[in-house]
Structure formats: structure tokens, C-alpha cells
Amino acid sequence: NAGVTQTPKFQVLKTGQSMTLQCAQDMNHEYMSWYRQDPGMGLRLIHYSVGAGITDQGEVPNGYNVSRSTTEDFPLRLLSAAPSQTSVYFCASSPTSQPQHFGDGTRLSIL
Amino acid sequence: KNEVEQSPQNLTAQEGEFITINCSYSVGISALHWLQQHPGGGIVSLFMLSSGKKKHGRLIATINIQEKHSSLHITASHPRDSAVYICAVSSGNTPLVFGKGTRLSVIA
């Protein structure tokens, strides 16, 4: 079982560049979410989705867009990267609102 | 919004010691989670509980709903238990709120 797959694992961007972090799950989970993890802080919710076609903002949504066209995929888009978005990003999925399956994370550096 | 506090922030133990990590929260919840994050970065769910106690191998999680407090115990600790342990809470279908984590180092 693949579980939750995040790509890429590492990425370096320049300020102002755009990119998409990919997240895919093969467990048919309705609930998917994106978090960022910064030193000294807990996981913070960026955006989440309770099913295909439905997304909502979390605690720190500014600078990020999401879409959920299928149950399996939940990409996170940075439209114009800023150094403050340097972080480790985790995608998670679960059959309810209780994330129990995390991806391995994407370490993103913005110069 | 629920506030989740974990203590201690950092913990160093000798192999074989009994370890306790604490988590307190400010508002009533429907479930509390304990998660483990290894140095490689992956996050694994250890327990989800809403009352009482759960045990898995050398790990025991307890929760006291009235006191809004949970503990994670590790018996006979081992260097492979070294990780960051994260507490998270939820109410109904609202997203999880996470604590900042407790970094545990177990020395042989």
C-alpha cells in the first residue's frame, strides 16, 4: 500500500517563483489536509478538504491555493514564493476529520 | 480555539527508564491523538482516545476528560524511542489542533 505520497521530497525555489506540491492517497479517504511545520511551532493547518470539490482554509492559508478535483489528489500551490514559506510541508488523509495517515513531507527552501 | 500545551519540551532519558510526557488542553474535546515523528521526519499516529487508557506494546496513553489532561508513558525506554512526540486534539469534525511536541532522546 502506498498510503499518502508527497512529491517532491526536497525543493529549492527563488523568491517569486511558483510551484505545486503534490499529494496523492490511495485509501479512498474523504478528508485531506496540508500542514506546515516550522521550528518551535506545532503543525499548522494551511488548507483542508472534506471531499472532492470542497476545500476550506485553515490557520495559515495566505499565499497558498488548493483544489480537490478527485478524491485521490490534493495539490498545494504556491503562486509567488516568499522566504517566509520556507518550511516542511506535510499532507495527511483520513476517513474522517482525524488525520491519521501522513505523507513523508516536502522540505521547501525559498531563497 | 483549543490551546494544547505539552511538557516537557525536551527530555533526555537513560535506556530502561520509565518516561512520561504530558499534554493539557483548554476546551472540551471529542478525541485526543498521540503522534510520533522520527528524526527522518515521518509522522505516525500512535493512539486516538476519548476516554480511559490504551496500550500498545511499551506505550500507554491515558486521558482524564475532567482535568483536560493526557499522558503518554513509555516503559523500558530504548534508544529507538528517540523521536518527537506530538499531542493533538479535535472536537467533532473540526481540524486537529497540535501541540508543539516533546523531543525525547534515549541514551544507551
Image (cartoon, coloured by chain):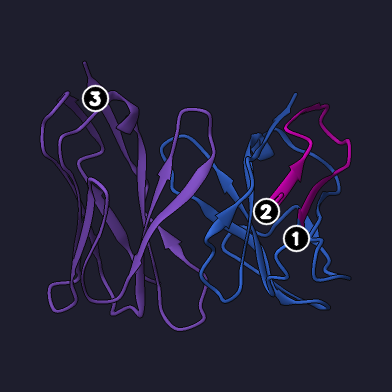
Chain colours: A blue, B purple
| Residue pictured at 44% horizontal, 48% vertical | A42
Residue carrying label 1: A26
Q: Horizontally, is B16 left or right of B88 in the view?
A: left
Q: Is residue A19 magenta?
A: yes
- Chain bearing mark 1: A
Q: Which mark is residue B106?
A: 3
Q: Are marks 3 and 2 on the same chain?
A: no
**Which contiguous range is marked in magenta?**
A1-24
**Could you tell me the amino acid type at mark 3?**
Val
In the rendered view, tell whether residue A2 sits above or below residue B62.
above
Residue B98 occupies quadrant: bottom left
Image coordinates of residue A34 in percent, x first then y, are: 65, 56
Residues at discs 2 and 1 both on one chain: yes
Q: CA distance from mark 2 to mark 1?
A: 6 Å
Rendering quarter of residue A62: bottom right
Q: Crowdedness of circle 2 by 10 Å Cα count: few (<14), some, many (20+)?
A: some
The Cα atoms of the two marked residues, 3 and 2, are separated by 29 Å
Q: Which residue is rendered at x = 46% and y = 28% of the image?
A: B39
Q: Give the residue type at disc 2.
A: Gly
Local crowd size for mark 3, using a 10 Å CA cut-off: few (<14), some (14–19), many (≥20) = some
